[in-house]
Amino acid sequence: MALKIIITGASSGIGQALAKEYDKQGAVIGLFARRKDKLIELQKTLSCKSLIFSVDVTDLAQCRLAAEEFMALHGTPDIVIANAGISSGTLTENFSDLETFKKIIATNLIGVTHTFYPFIQAFKKRGSGHLVGISSVAGIRGLPGAGAYSSSKAALTNYLESLRIELFSTNIYVTTIAPGYIKSSMTDVNDFSMPFLMPTDKAARAIIKAIKNKKKYCIVPWQMNIIGRIMYLLPIMIWDWLARRAPRKKTTPL
Ligand SMILES: NC(=O)c1ccc[n+]([C@@H]2O[C@H](COP(=O)([O-])OP(=O)(O)OC[C@H]3O[C@@H](n4cnc5c(N)ncnc54)[C@H](OP(=O)(O)O)[C@@H]3O)[C@@H](O)[C@H]2O)c1
């Protein structure tokens, strides 16, 4: 039986690479993103069965409709990957950045709840399913100049943990993926050096392996796992000293 998979943010970067990797496995894929033209371009390169949904994950009604359409045609999916996300540098003292805060939280946190919501009842009814959230190493500790992104991913990681425990006895798995630096349009704008920058296709393979192994939490690439664990354990004074020197992400229009 072909795996049935939903991928949000499939129009570029990690989401697109995940779709291309699952294509090799002959999966049936629901491709979600706002830019339909990019999804059509991707679909032309895939040989598996795929469906395009022009969806903004901040809009619950759009997410529900797309989920229902997919399930009406192909039944309940096996895996739902909430990958859609946005990023920008932000400073709370800048009035215009307050709107950016709202957009980032709405997409990176609330968008994931909108993505999962329509599928959880269907998973429960069938007695199986796998929810995957793409969080970030940036959520492990507060990053200066990126308060919105860093806090959105910290909140997402905790939300996914809550969900994992809530669904413990239901045979529904929850996997949190925390990427370090992966090559994509999100990192192409960075003008600082990015340690262990990973090609997108390699990242997609590592993520798929973690999903297959039903990992609860996985940092990619593996070198970032060591850094992530150290970041988590560092005392506040040392973290503050180090983070003050960290490069800051540019503000980009969203
Ligand atoms: N690249 C990294 O180093 C890195 C590191 C840690 C975590 N991540 C996370 O990985 C995920 C993918 O990022 P990426 O690096 O592949 O960046 P990307 O190339 O910019 O892709 C982001 C994807 O999210 C979609 N998206 C954004 N807002 C959306 C919305 N409101 N509704 C539906 N889709 C939306 C975009 O599609 P449309 O614009 O067509 O809607 C796009 O397909 C994000 O959650 C990001 O935070 C990335």
Image: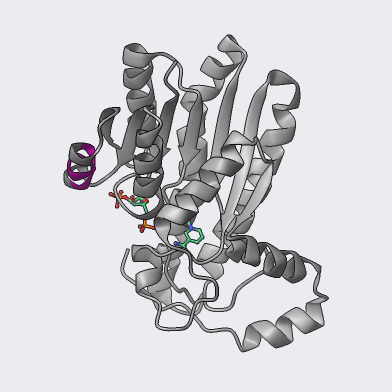
Is residue 58 placed above or below 73 in the rendered structure?
below
Closer to us: 22 or 34: 22
Is residue 120 placed above or below 149 in the rendered structure?
above
In the rendered image, residue 31, in percent from the top left (x then y), is placed at 32, 36
Q: Would you identify the image quadrant in which residue 126 lies? A: top right
Look at the image and tell me in which quarter the C terminus lies. bottom left
Look at the image and tell me in which quarter the N terminus lies. top left
Q: Would you identify the image quadrant in which residue 232 lies? A: bottom right
202 vs 74, left or right, is right
In the rendered image, residue 235, in percent from the top left (x then y), is placed at 83, 76
In the rendered image, residue 189, in percent from the top left (x then y), is placed at 35, 74
Is residue 69 placed above or below 85 in the rendered structure?
above
Residue 42 lies in the magenta stretch: yes
Instruction: Write down the region rendered in magenta.
Output: 38-43
Viewer can see residue 86: no
Q: Secondary structure of the magenta portion, mostly?
A: helix
